Every structure is written in structure tokens, then in C-alpha cells.
Amino acid sequence: MLAKLSLLQTLRNRKGIDGLLFAGWGGSLVLILGLFVALFFAVGFWWVYWRSADMDTWMVYEAFLLDDGLRQEYFDHPGYLTILLLGEWFRLLHAAGLLPANALSVLPQVADNAASGVAWMRATQAGRLLSLLLALSFLLSFAGLLRVWLRDWRIAALAMFMLAFSGGMMMEARTMRTELIAAGCAYTALLILLVVHRAAPSVRLLLVALAAFLAMLAMENKVHIIFLLAAMAPLVVILAPDEPRQQPRVGIATAIGAIMAAVVLAWLAWPLAHAGLFDPAIVAQRQALLGTGFPLQQSAIALWFALWIALYALRARLDAAESVAAVAALIAGGALGLLTLDLRYDLQNVAAALNPFETMFAFAAGSHPDLVAGGAVAGGSAFKLVLDGIMLLLARLTFVLASSPRPTIFLEWAVFAMLIYGWRRGHRKLVLQAAAMIGASLAVDLVGTVRGLKLEYFLITDPLVIMTAGLLLVKMPELQTHRLTYPLGAALICVTFAVGLAEPVKHSFKRDRPLDFCVPHYNKTQRIERFSFCP
């Protein structure tokens, strides 16, 4: 009885942000990641291999092809890094004796149904373990860089919890999806650019190059990420600090070194870029879709980024040497990222990464044939699709009209409330910055509505909502101790945990089999005659 009274008293005494935490920085990381890993093995790791068949089966199949030295067959996303890492992971586990079958040539005969099922199961579990490691890397980089940006470990720890148990992360850590690597690289790049001004000159250029490198890697795995990258450009300018520069400027010699590195790497990457933009087959496809073979959209993307780079240079008061050096660093990092496509060269990967809009439009047209009329873009159908997307997005925001396993929606409600609070308290600039972040998130989500704003797309914008909430809490410290912060924060934590875990639990009870795979030599796995789950 006394113990219960003591617990109740402790809960009553809890208040504000501090009341939501049970340990310090290190302890919080251990608790969150420990629970995350424990739930992975409790719910997800032991699913039968065909439980999330569409991407899991395709990615495992592509890794089997890679380890047999065969050509990649899947290029939709294009999934380049996921396939490359998975193939090397299989090779490593096979060499260690932990994965019996790592390639098509060593798979059991299709007639041996039981052995075939076991081989696919072990390979899929190995892939899930890789996804877990990638998810943990994403969470650690997100929390660590967020702490550096906001300078508040408490907010960073809570943000890590919100991301870890968001609906997208919960499923992406249990399946082999291309969004995980793409979003991880993109948000690491964004946070690097938000803190880069605090570093020494030479380190600043290296960090800028690293951000560009990561952005290119994100594109190579999921071309849909281009919308997030495009939104990042103005956000970096909008969120640029007003504090006076504390570090010395980049010198002439350092700038010359950056330019030389950019020239060399761009020269090495040029054959890839030229092939991806000007191969005759690619030009013909662009001509049919847009009415011109010239890379108009790529030019527009380049101009978009150039505009925001110039605005950042003006706002940060960069001199000519530092501005040129920064641009050189961006080119060098992007070129180095592009060169990774040579690790397992295929023109279709290069074409997908360098022609994102064409790739996505061709993919979307498969679900919405009315988008294309006479081989070209049908404007009326595209406009209708946008209107339908806005309605779906608004319905999703209410959660009631269109529910989803996305607990970050409730955090978004809290952000809207904080925006109103901040505006009434006179934090106009902060509110506009946060509104820009939320607006960018909604804009990227709107694009995702073309594909029904599926759970897999949540990971692309959820971190941005979490960053917005963290920024508002840090910049309005009175909210950290507000009387409503603890009860609402505790409720939000509970809801995030429950809703985020709902989809993995739901998948654990699924019994329907992917019978559409049960045709001889299914089009995504053409070298497989049949699967063990087929009748």
C-alpha cells in the first residue's frame, strides 16, 4: 500500500519535459534502443518469410542474383544500395557459416518444398537483421545530430523515442524497404547542414561534401526522396542561425583545394552523368513523355538548388572564397556519391537516379493510366489527382476521417497548438520557421498521396515533424515547464507506442498468403519457378 502511495506521489511530482524522462542521455538511449530491439525480436523477426512479400521477397531475390554475379532485375525505386548491402551482408553471413543459401545457385531444388521454405526464411530473417541495424544507425545519427542542433539532450532523447516508435520506423525496421536508407541519408544530410556553421573552415567543407554525398546516396535508393531534398534547400536557409560567426573564414588555399577536388571527382563521374541523362533510350523516353529530349526537369532542379545556395551565402554573409568553396564541396560530394553506382554498374540505376520525375511518373502511370494521354502527360488528370490528394491529406490529418498507423499525426496536432501559442506570445519568426517545416512535410506527403500515402512513406516526413516539435520546445522554453506539458507529453508517448506498434502486431496475425506470386516465374522473381507457400 505504501509503495503504491509512493508511486502516485512520484507521478504527481513529475512535471514538464523532465518528468517524461527516466534517465540521462546515455540511459535514455539504452532504454529506447533496448526496447526497440526487444520488440523487433518479439514481433517481426519470426514472421514467415512471405508475410511482407512484395518488397522482402524481391530484395532477397535481388541479393541472390548479386551473389551469383547476375544482373540486377529490380529498378523501380531503384533500390540500388539496399540490394548492394543485402548482397554483401548475405555473402558475409554465408562465409561465417550463418546463412546456408546466399545465392540462387545454392538454393534447394524447388521440388524440396520444406528445404526451399527454410532457405527463404533464413535469408529473409538475415535481411530483417540488416534492416534493424540500418534503423538503429538512423536513430542514433538522428538523435545525436539533433542534440547538437538543438543543444538539449532531453529534447533529442524524446525525439528519438518518437521516431523509433513511429509507424513508419516500426515497419521499416522489420522489412526490406528502400525508404529506410533514403530517409536516413537525407535527414543526416539535413542535420549536418543545420550545424555545419559551428565547425572549423576545413571541417565545414568536409561536412558540406558529406551532406551532398549522402543526398546522392538517398537518390540512388529511392527517387521519391527528391521532394524531401528539394524541400531541404529552403529549410536550410530559413533555419540558418542569426548568431554572429564564431569560426574563421575559409582561406584561398582551402578554396582552391576544394575546387580541385570537385573538378577531379566531376570528371570521373561525368561518364555516368552523361549516360544517365543522354543515353538515346533515355532521351527517347523523355521525348515521348515531355515532348523534348532536353533534360528540362534536371535543369530546373539544378537552378532550384543554385538559388537557395546563393540565398544562404547572402544570409550567412559568406565571402566569395567561402561561397565558391562550398559549391565545390557540394559538387565533389555529389559526384562521389554518383560514383558509387560504379560498384555494380547498370545503366538503369543511373537513369533512375538522374531522371527522378520521369521514373516516378512512369511508375505512377501504372497505377493511374489516365495520367498519360497519347504518350504524354495529361494535365487534367494530374490536376484531379492533386485535388484528390489534398482531400486525402486533410482527412488523414484528422485521423478520425481516415485513420492510419501513424502516431506522428498526434504530434503534428501538438505542433499546430504550439504554433498558435507562439504566435500569440510574439514569437513570429520562430512560428514562421516552424510553419515552413510543417508546410514542407505536408507538401512531400501530398506527393505521396499519388500512391495512397502508404505506411512506407511515413518515414520520409515524420522526422521533419519531430524536428519541428523539438525546435519549438527549445526556442520556447516556457513550454518545457508548462502545466500541460507533462500530462499531454505522457499521453503522446503512450499513444505513439500503441499506434506505432499496431501494424507490426496486425501483421503477426495475418494469415492470407501472397497468391499473386504463385504463377510460374513471377515477373519480379523471374528465375524462381515457384515458392514454398504456393498451393
Image (spheres, rainbow, N blue to C red):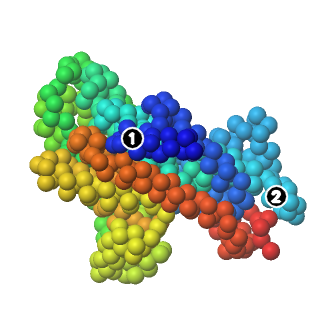
Q: Quadrant of residue 435?
A: bottom left
In the picture, the disc for residue 116 is 2
Q: Is residue 418 above or below residue 380?
A: above
Task: State the residue in front, 31 or 282.
Answer: 31
Residue 120: horizontal and vertical position, in percent? 75, 55
Cβ atoms at labels 2 and 1 below 8 Å apart:
no
Kind of residue at badge 1: Asn
Compared to residue 202, the image places residue 441 above or below, namely below
Q: Is residue 397 above or below residue 477?
A: below
| Numbered tag placed on residue 13 in the rendering | 1
Q: Amino acid at mark 2?
A: Ser
Q: Is residue 165 left or right of residue 386?
A: right
Q: Check the picture and name the quadrant holding the N terminus.
A: top right
Q: Is residue 524 left or right of residue 114?
A: left
Circle 1: is it few (<14), some (14-19), or many (20+) Cα within 10 Å?
Answer: few
Question: Horizontal and vertical percent for residue 508?
Answer: 66, 62
Determine whether, in the image, residue 535 is placed left or right of residue 184.
right
Q: Under tag 2, what secondary structure? A: helix
Q: Nearer the viewer, residue 410 or 205?
A: 410
Which of the two labelled residues, at mark 2 and mark 1, occupies the earlier sequence position? 1
Outermost residue, front side:
1
Residue 212 at x, y percent in the picture: 35, 39
Residue 110 occupies which quadrant of the picture?
bottom right
Q: Residue at 57% of width from left, 50% of height from top?
A: 173
Q: Residue at x 33, y 43 (%)?
A: 16
* Image quarter in which the C terminus is found: bottom right
**On screen, residue 209 above or below 62:** above
Secondary structure beneath label 1: helix
Toward the viewer: 181 or 159? 159
Indicate which disc residue 210 carries. Answer: none
In the rendered view, does 469 fall on the left or right side of 282? left
The outermost residue toward the right is 112
